[in-house]
Image (spheres, rainbow, N blue to C red):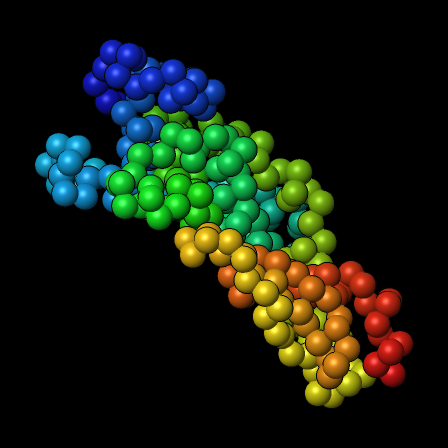
Amino acid sequence: MSKEKPQEEYGREFISLGEKLGFASGDFEVLRLALTHSTFFEGNRHGSQGGVGDDNQRLEFLGDAVLDLIVGDYLFTRYPKAREGELSKMRAYLVCEASLAEAAKALGLAENLRMGKGAEAGGDRNRPSVQADAFEAVIGAIFLTQGYQKSRQLILKQFAQRMDTLVPEDYEDKKSMLQELVQTIAPRGVVYRVLGQSGPDHQPRFESGVYCGKLLLGKGEGGSKKESEVAAAAVALKAQDQWLKKLE
C-alpha cells in the first residue's frame, strides 16, 4: 500500500471521490495514479522522474482484465442458456468505450483527471476514450487496494441493471441486422450518408442517414462516423414498421 500523505495535498473533490470509492487515505496515491493521464508529465513540468507507473496505463491494463472477468462471470450465471458467442457479444456491448465513459461520468472521474496542458486545451478530458481508460484504471486501483469483492460491488452497481435486461437488439451488430432485414426485400441493401457535422475539431458530432435507394430509413448521431451510422441503424430497426411496406 502507498505511504500515507497529508490529506491537504489532494484537495476536497479528490478526497470526496476517494472516500466514495472506499479508498483509505493511505491508498489515495494509488487512486491519484489511476487518474493520471499519460500526458501529465510531458516536459517533466510536474517533476516526474519518468519511471514506470507514472501514469494510469498499467492500472488500466489490470482494470480491463478485472472488468472482463467480473462482467463475464455475471453474464455466465445470469444467462445459463447463452452460447459462448452470444456471451461475448453481450460483454463487448457492456464494456464498450461509450459504456465505460458513461460509468466514468457517473462517478465523477473526469473532473479529477490529471493531464498535460496540451491535452487539456485539446479537450481530452471530455473524450470518451480518455474517460473509459480512467474508469478501467480506477477498477484496477480498487482491485489492488480493496480486493476482488469491492471491485465486483462497484462494477455491478454500474452495470447489473443493464446486464439483467439485455435483449439481442442491444448487443447484436445493428448494421448487420438492418442489412439482413432489408435484403430479404430489396437485394441492393442499404447505404449510409453523412448528413452533417458539428462541434469543435476535438469533439465533433456527426449525423448520418441510412438509405435504401432514395428512401431514408433512419438518422442517428455520434462522436464518429461509425457511431452515427450505428445509431442510424438502431433508429431504422426500431422504426421498421414505418418503412418495410414501402420496400415491397
Which quarter of the figure is the C terminus placed in?
A: bottom right
Residue 241 shows up from this direction: yes
Which quarter of the figure is the N terminus placed in?
A: top left
Q: Disc count in the image?
A: 0
Question: Which quadrant holds residue 113?
Answer: top left
Q: Residue at x 68, y 72 (%)?
A: 210
User: Vertically, is 170 above or below 14?
Assistant: below
* Residue 192 at x, y percent in the picture: 62, 74
Quick one: 87 or 118, which is closer to the camera? 118
Q: Residue at x 70, y 87 (%)?
A: 188
User: Vertically, is 24 above or below 77?
Assistant: above
Q: Residue at x 43, y 39 (%)?
A: 135
Q: Residue at x 71, y 76 (%)?
A: 211
User: Vertically, is 6 above or below 125?
Assistant: above
* Residue 149 at x, y percent in the picture: 47, 29
Question: Which quadrant holds residue 206?
Answer: bottom right
* Residue 129 at x, y percent in the picture: 43, 50
* Residue 73 at x, y percent in the picture: 54, 44
Question: Which quadrant holds residue 144?
Answer: top left
Quick one: 41 or 160, which is closer to the camera? 41
Q: Is residue 84 left or right of residue 216?
A: left
In the image, farthest residue toward the bottom: 187
Residue 229 shows up from this direction: no
Quick one: 74 or 157, which is closer to the camera? 157
Quick one: 239 or 118, which is closer to the camera? 118
Q: Is residue 144 left or right of residue 195?
A: left
User: Vertically, is 22 above or below 91?
Assistant: above
Q: Is residue 241 left or right of residue 219?
A: right
